[in-house]
Image (cartoon, helix red, strand yellow):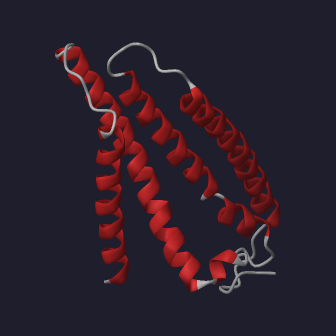
Amino acid sequence: MAPANDIPYDTTLDKFLGCILAILLVVGLVANIIALFYFCFKIPSRGKNAQYFQNIYIIISIVDSLICLTLIPYIEAAFAEDRAGKMFKDDTFCAVWSVTWQVLPEISVFLVALLSTSRLIILTKPTRQLLPSLAWIIPTIYFVLTLGLKVVLLLT
């Protein structure tokens, strides 16, 4: 079935892309869940900042797992006859997915920046102790602000 603009397309390429995305989804999800379990159940080292960094790695694993899950609608659309799939036909789903698709990668980049900045602080001030709760508080504040901004932009 051709798309609405009647330009013919090859469904083979769609299905190939869907297979590649499905493989990436499985590999990414499995690897991130393994990392999540490792950091959740790992006994922190004796370093005074070990719990802080362990918390950041836990959050990174969670966010990256969620990023992998955002591929599911793409995969479903790649195998759909109309190239839209069932999920993308729902306006509410599209709005929520659109914000999620934009916010999660930004949070992932922010977490890497937070990790790098934290390591820089520890290198420049080795006696400095970072509060483990800050590893949850700072990304949560960033998430709420970014989500709020994206929703406001979506509604305007």
Q: Residue 38's spot in the image, x, y percent?
A: 60, 28
Q: Is residue 122 above or below residue 53?
A: above
Q: Is residue 5 above or below residue 41?
A: below
Q: Is residue 144 above or below residue 56?
A: below
From the viewer's side, name the closer residue of 23 and 55: 55
From the viewer's side, name the closer residue of 136 and 31: 136
Q: Residue 105's spot in the image, x, y percent?
A: 45, 51
Is 63 situated left or right of 65 in this image?
Answer: left
Is 23 situated left or right of 126 in this image?
Answer: right
Identify the residue shown where x is 45% and y is 15%: 45
Quarter placement of the C terminus: bottom left
Identify the residue shown where x is 74% and y is 51%: 22
Count of labels in the image: 0
Identify the residue shown where x is 64% and y is 39%: 33
Identify the residue shown where x is 50% and y is 61%: 101
Task: Kindly indicate the quadrant of the structure image that contains residue 79.
Answer: bottom right
Q: Residue 24's spot in the image, x, y percent?
A: 69, 44
Q: Residue 48's spot in the image, x, y percent?
A: 32, 18
Quarter placement of the N terminus: bottom right
